[in-house]
Amino acid sequence: MKISTREDFPGWIPGNLSKGHLDRFYFLLAGLIAADFVVYLVCAKWYKYIKSEASFSESMVGEEV
């Protein structure tokens, strides 16, 4: 691909994958996913369910309109 390549840089996926260091990219993705999961766990721990009042249809039972 001519778009992602330059003079000394082979681009996103070079001919030799060992020189492309795709492992670093996947470690970065794994780290970001782990950080996102930690944030999710913190938010889930702080979340408190608030029971709402009866729905509109339940509150209208027995009332004259």
Image (cartoon, rainbow, N blue to C red):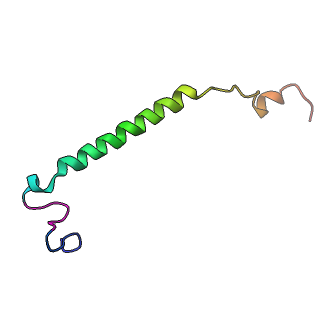
**Left or right of residue 30: residue 39:** right
Tag count? 0
Give the vertical position of 32 relative to 10 (above or below).
above
Q: Position of residue 63 (x, y in %)?
A: 90, 28
**Viewer-nearest residue: 36 or 59:** 36
**Magenta-span inclusion, residue 14:** yes
Q: Quadrant of the C terminus?
A: top right
Tell me the residue at 19%/74% (across/down).
2
Q: Where is residue 6 in the image (x, y as percent from the top left)?
A: 18, 73
Tell me the residue at 29%/46% (across/down).
28
Q: Position of residue 34 (x, y in %)?
A: 36, 36
Q: Quadrant of the N terminus?
A: bottom left
Q: Where is residue 44 in the image (x, y as percent from the top left)?
A: 52, 29
Tell me the residue at 20%/61% (across/down).
12
**Viewer-nearest residue: 36 or 52:** 36
**Left or right of residue 2: residue 38:** right
**Left or right of residue 38: residue 11:** left
In the orientation shown, which residue stands out farthest toward the right?
A: 64
**Viewer-nearest residue: 2 or 8:** 8
Tell me the residue at 84%/30% (across/down).
60
**Magenta-span inclusion, residue 60:** no
Q: What stretch is highlighted in magenta?
A: 9-15
The secondary structure that most of the magenta stretch takes on is loop
